[in-house]
Image (cartoon, helix red, strand yellow):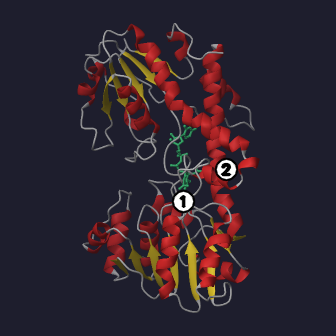
Amino acid sequence: MKITTIGLGYIGLPTSILFATHGHQVTGVDIRPSVVDTLNQGLIHIEEEGLQALYNEALAAGNFQASLTPTHSDAFIIAVPTPNNDDRYKSCDLTYVEAAVNSIIPYLEEGNLVIVESTIAPRTTEDIVQPMLEQAGFTIGKDIFLAHCPERVLPGNIAYELVHNPRIIGGVTPACTTAAKAMYGTVVEGELIDSSASEAELSKLMENTYRDVNIALANELAKIGTDLHINALKVIEMANRHPRVNLHSPGPGVGGHCLAVDPYFVAAASPSFSPLIQTAREINSSMPAFVVDATEKLMQDAPNKKVTVFGLTYKGNIDDIRESPAMDIFGMLEFQGYDVAAYDPHVASAPLTIEEACADSSLILVLTDHSEFTEIEATATAHMAIPRLLDTKNIVKETAANMTRMHLGNVYEHIQVKLLQR
Ligand code: SAJ
């Protein structure tokens, strides 16, 4: 098949490469000339394990080219970003999706398949994209086939998960589902699940909302434990030994471009019926302030204002700092006048060595669960003003013997003033 992908980001590029390595002729379109140039020089512009090798394969087969404009194709896949609008409920900003749809309309021909892969608010395919195509003169399900097929991959493992995860195929009509299934069936080995576009949209959003709500429950428990002087981490560990309980882990907040974004799309689409989702977002968004509050109370007895942050990314073992609560905490502490040093072996813009970051520090704040933080060498922390550490991700297992180790389950033991007002 001839396939055009609109948007060559974290999802669009791996998806394009996948189809290109399975014998399809793919044109990848992006509005950024630098991305198109880099790709046409044989290099990928995102960091993703194993993807360059697959790209080399696609190029060797002569099956991929990057371009600034679409071309006539059998199928069009839209994989552009959908940020939050700056409105009351942070609704889904469809600017890029609409621009992408408009950009392909001049190239559409009878029999073509249009897939929206971007994460979108519920009902968007039927209420917004379908009318745009109909206005251009096409009958959906007859001369053009339209479906929403959300991806569900985990950054860092995209190449594998694109192939093996079950995939929801949400056609606007049954004929649309059949057409989309035929295309994905050429590359996906996981189950292809028949669905409608609206069900597919809401399912994708609720998968991330499920996780966000559960993390909020764990974060609320950490606050309750701090208030009542009960070790919440111990409570979670014990509760999870019940065969049907799976409490998640508290932390400094929820980051990334999925969990911290998608639940708002549901809430904005149905604000009166989503109080739980909205509250979960509020709880998770309040965690950076909670950690900063704990830090300020711990620092009341410090001889200086130096705090060391371990980890800036939104989760462990990746280099992505988008929507990262660690970055929020870093900024909030600087704003409060602290001298903040960051150590993150995964982030190029954090150049300090661990020794430099820890020198004269009165507190280490562990904000990301990078595996490097499991063991913290005694030599790295030998020159701290006060050897102590607040591990918000409960990842640290070994430190210098004189290090005071705190986590979100027991930080109350180390704070004189009450952390939370009842
Ligand atoms: N986190 C906690 N406590 C926990 C688990 C996670 O605080 O118990 C935090 C993490 O530190 C991080 C955030 O939540 O800040 C999100 O991390 P994540 O690994 O749960 O999710 P993402 O955003 O990297 O990827 C998610 C995945 N969705 C689900 O697991 C339901 C992925 O499968 C989706 O493809 C992706 O969102 C997406 O693109 O939607």
Q: Residue furthest bottom?
A: 110
Q: Name the residue under label 2.
A: 267
Q: What element carries label 1?
A: loop
How many numbered markers are drawn?
Answer: 2
Residue 182 in sight here: no
Compare residues 286 and 79 and report the one nearer the observer.
286
Which quarter of the figure is the C terminus placed in? top right
When asked about the image quadrant of residue 185, the answer is bottom right
Compare residues 137 and 50 and report the one nearer the observer.
137
What residue is shown at x 41% (from left), y 72% (from top)? 17
Left or right: 189 as drawn, with respect to 139: left
Residue 337 in sight here: yes
Q: Position of residue 349 (x, y in %)?
A: 27, 42
Mark 1 residue CB less than 8 A from any atom of ligand 1: no
What residue is shown at x 55% (from left), y 15% (from top)? 419
Q: Residue furthest front?
A: 87
Q: Earlier in the sequence, mark 2 or mark 1?
A: 1
Left or right: 324 as drawn, with respect to 215: left
When asked about the image quadrant of residue 91, the answer is bottom right
Q: How crowded is mark 1: few (under 14 residues within 10 Å), some or many (20 or more)?
A: some
Cα separation, mark 2 vs mark 1, equals 14 Å
Which numbered marker is on residue 93?
Answer: 1
Q: Position of residue 218 (x, y in %)?
A: 63, 32
The kind of residue tagged 2 is Ala
* Whether residue 273 is situated above or below residue 1 in the rendered picture: above
Left or right: 174 as drawn, with respect to 99: right
What residue is shown at x 63% (from left), y 13% (from top)? 229
The kind of residue tagged 1 is Asp
* Whether residue 105 is situated above or below residue 223 in the rendered picture: below
Q: Where is residue 77 in the image (x, y as percent from the top left)?
A: 51, 75
